[in-house]
Image (tube, grey):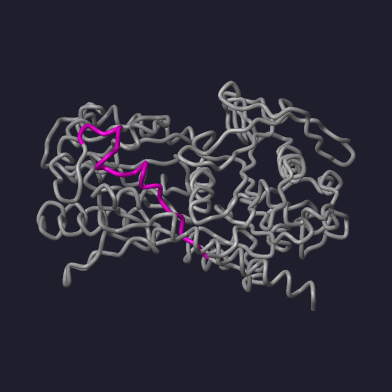
Amino acid sequence: MRDALNILFTASEAVPFAKTGGLADVAGALPKALEQIGHNVVVVMPRYYSIDRSKLEHIPGPLGVPMGPMGTLWAGVFKGTLPGSDVPVYFIDYEAFYGRSGLYADENGFSYEDNDKRFIFLSKAAFELASKIDFKPDIIHSHDWHTAIQPILQKSRYAFDERFKDAATILTIHNLQHQGHFFKGAVDVMEVGWERFNPHELESMDGVNFLKGGIAAADAVTTVSRKYAREIQTPHFGFGLEEHIRAHSHKLYGILNGVDYSEWNPAKDRYIAKNYDIDDLSGKAECKRELQGRFGLPEFHDVPLVGFVGRFAEQKGIGLIAQTVERLVHLGIQFVMLGTGEKWAEGFFSDVSARYPDNFGCHVGYSEELAHKIEAGCDLFLMPSLFEPCGLNQIYSLRYGTLPVVRATGGLDDTIVNYDPATGEGNGFKFHDATADALYNTLKWAVETYRYEKDAYRTMQKRGMEARFGWEESAKAYEDIYLHAIYKKAAEKHR
C-alpha cells in the first residue's frame, strides 16, 4: 500500500453544507473517496451564515489571517465532518465576509464587490488553519478561482514555511467561465509580490485574474472531464485563457467527476414514490405517475415525460429550450423543469406552464427531493448545455433508467454514447450544433425511439443502469496526479 498523503482541500462550497453548482458535489464527495483509499484529508471552507453552527464543534482560540494593508483579521473556527465519513471540515467564521444572504452574490444576482478579499481571506485562512491544528500537507488542492491563489501563496508568502514549502499544489478547474477578475490592488492583500503581476501570471487587462495566476503557479492543473481539458484550449471554450492554458498544457489533466451512488440509487432512494432496480423496473411507472401529479399533469403512462434540472442560465442551453419549447409541447410529450436563475427564464417557463398545463410543468427554485423525483419519474432527460465541464445529471439519469438527450460537449460527450439504430449500441442521444433545430430534431428522435422502438429503448435503459461512474476510480486518478506532482517537485528541488 502506498503511504498516506496529507491533503489540504480548500473549497468555497461543499455538499451538504453549501451549494451553487458541481464544485460543491466534488468537494463533498472526493475527500471521502480519498479517505477510503487511505489518505488524510482536511477540508476548509467558509462558515456561511446559512450553515448552523450549533451543529458544529467550536475550535477554541481565534485564527489570525494576514491580509496585507488590511492588517491581521481574526476569525473563529468550527469543525464538522462530511456525512458518512471521518473527513473533518473546518469552517472559517468571519461575519464581515460570510454573514450574508448568498455565497457569491446578493439576492438580486449582483456579485459582492469585495469577493476578492473574501476569497483571499479563505485561501490564506487554510494555511493558517493547518498551522493551528498542526497539519503538514503533502498536497494543497485548490478549486476554481476562489482558492486559485493558493499555489501562488505556497510559492511566495509561505515558500519558506517548513510546514508548506515542500507541498505540491493542485488546482482543479470546475468552470473556466468564472475566473476571478479584480482590481490590481488585490496583489497587496495577497502579499505575493508585485513581480507576479505580469502577463504570464496574474495580470489581465491591468487587473488581476486569480485563475490565470493559479494555473501558472500550480504544480498540476486538472479539469473535470477529458474532453473539457481539450476544449478549454480552444477560443470557443477558453474564455480568453486558451493560449495561457495551452502554454501550461504539459501539466493539464482531465478527470471525470464521480457520482455518490449511496445518494443516487433508485433501489434505495428515500425521495421517490417506489424503489426499483434493473431487474424490476415496475416502480418507475409509479414514480412517473407521482411526478405527473406533482406538476398537475394528466397521468398518462404512455406519454413520453421529459425532464430538466439545472440552473436557468445560458450555459445550460436554457435559450435553446426557450426557442423550441412551443414545438416541443406539440410533439405530444410532457415536459417538467426544476431550476432557478435568470429572471427572464423563470418568468418565461412559468408562463409556458400556465399556457400548456397538460404538457408543461415548471418549478422555480431548487428541491433535492424533487430533483430525485424527476430523475426517477421521467423517460428522457434533456441537457442541451452550450458547454459542460463534467455534468452529473446525465450520470444520475443513466442510473435511474432515464435516457439522456445531450449536446456533445465536455463531460456530456465523454459519458453518453449516441444511439446507433443499426447496431443497437448507445446509452442516450446526442447533438452537436448549439441550435434550436438540433435540439428539437434530437429530442424528436428520442421520443420516437421511446414510442416505436421499445426493445431498443429498454436495452439502453438497462445498459445505462449497469454503468458505474463512482468516485473510487476518480480518486485513484487524483492520487496518481498527486504522486506525480510530488515527485516532479522533489526532482526540481534537487536539480
- Residue 65: x and y in percent read 80, 38
In the rendered image, the vertical position of residue 67 relative to residue 102, given as above or below: below
In the drawing, does residue 357 fall left or right of residue 70? left
Q: Dominant secondary structure of the magenta stretch?
A: loop
Q: Is residue 418 magenta?
A: no
- Residue 292: x and y in percent read 21, 32
In the rendered image, the vertical position of residue 275 relative to residue 61, given as above or below: below
In the drawing, does residue 485 fall left or right of residue 160? left
In the drawing, does residue 98 fall left or right of residue 476? right
- Residue 379: x and y in percent read 21, 46
In the drawing, does residue 69 fall left or right of residue 124? right
Visible in this render: residue 401? yes
Visible in this render: residue 441? no
Residue at x 69%, y 65% (from the top left corner): 219
Quadrant including the C terminus? bottom right
Furthest residue in direction bottom, as rendered: 495
In the rendered image, the vertical position of residue 61 relative to residue 191, given as above or below: above
- Residue 296: x and y in percent read 22, 26
Nearer to us in this view, 14 or 359: 14
Residue at x 69%, y 72% (from the top left corner): 488
Q: Which image quadrant for residue 214?
A: bottom right
**Which residues make up the magenta segment?**
254-274
